[in-house]
Each structure stands twice: as C-alpha cells, then as structure tokens.
C-alpha cells in the first residue's frame, strides 16, 4: 500500500449515530427551543378538550349500554332502561360540542403567545 493513498469508507448509519451523539452535547439553539415551545403550546390547546370529550364519550357509552341491558335483559326495568339509555345518548351527543368549546377557549387564551412566537420565528 502506498502511503500517499487515501482510503475512506462511508457508513450512513454510523454518520447518523455520530450526529445524534454530537447533538446531545451541543448547546441548544434558541430557534429550536422556540419551535419546541410553539409545538407544546399548540398541543396544549387541544388536550383538555380531548380529555373531556373522552370522559363524556365513555360515560355516555356506558349509560347507553346499561339502558339497553335494562330494556333487553331485565324486563322489570324497561322504563328505567329507556330513561338511562336516553341519558346516555344525550351524554354522547355532548362530547363533540364540549371538545370544540374547550379547545376554542384554550386557543383564545394562548393565541397571543403563539402569535408572538411565530413572529419571532419568521424574522
């Protein structure tokens, strides 16, 4: 082998791993922090609405199921089953409007911060 020769082997997976390790030790950029904050704020606007909608949806489904059981299985509780089933349907139908209302309110609260961050990132 000639000492003047240069050999180089390239491994894409090795280079990716090196970049990941290097990224852990570099100081975080301010832009990356702002973008991460923007993502978290955007996600935080929907999370409370999703939680409330899930709770209403699950509760409504359970009520509807109990009402159906009363109507179909226990004929002595027919009237009670109809009432419980209707309450379940009402609860289910409130899930989506509750999600929309809570999400809209949360977006109104965090809108100034989102707009400030997006203005800073666009500059």
Image (cartoon, rainbow, N blue to C red):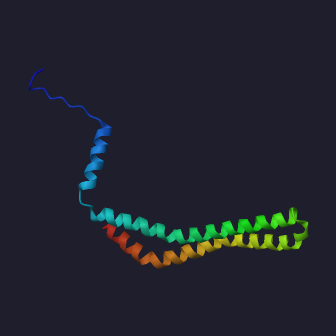
Q: Position of residue 6 (x, y in %)?
A: 15, 29
Taking the spot 24% from the left edge, 31% from the top edge, the residue there is 9
Q: Residue furthest right?
A: 76
Quarter of the image with the N terminus in it:
top left
Which quarter of the picture shows residue 3?
A: top left
Residue 28 left/right relative to 102: left
Which quarter of the picture shows residue 101?
A: bottom right
Q: Residue furthest left?
A: 3
Decide which of 107, 48 is in the foreground and name it.
48
Taking the spot 67% from the left edge, 67% from the top edge, the residue there is 57
Residue 104 left/right relative to 24: right
Quarter of the image with the C terminus in it:
bottom left
Decide which of 35, 59 is in the foreground and name it.
59
Which quarter of the picture shows residue 75?
A: bottom right
Q: Position of residue 33 (x, y in %)?
A: 32, 65
Residue 59 left/right relative to 12: right
Q: Position of residue 30 (x, y in %)?
A: 28, 65
């Amino acid at each position: 082998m000639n000492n003047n020769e240069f050999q180089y082997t390239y491994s894409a997976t090795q280079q990716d791993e090196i970049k990941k390790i290097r990224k852990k030790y570099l100081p975080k950029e301010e832009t990356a922090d702002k973008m991460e904050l923007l993502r978290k704020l955007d996600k935080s606007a929907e999370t409370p609405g999703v939680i409330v909608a899930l709770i209403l949806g699950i509760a409504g489904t359970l009520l509807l199921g109990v009402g159906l059981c009363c109507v179909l299985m226990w004929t002595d509780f027919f009237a009670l089953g109809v009432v419980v089933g209707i309450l379940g349907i009402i609860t289910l139908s409130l899930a989506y409007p509750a999600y929309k209302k809570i999400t809209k309110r949360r977006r109104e609260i965090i809108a100034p911060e989102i707009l400030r961050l997006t203005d800073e990132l666009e500059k």
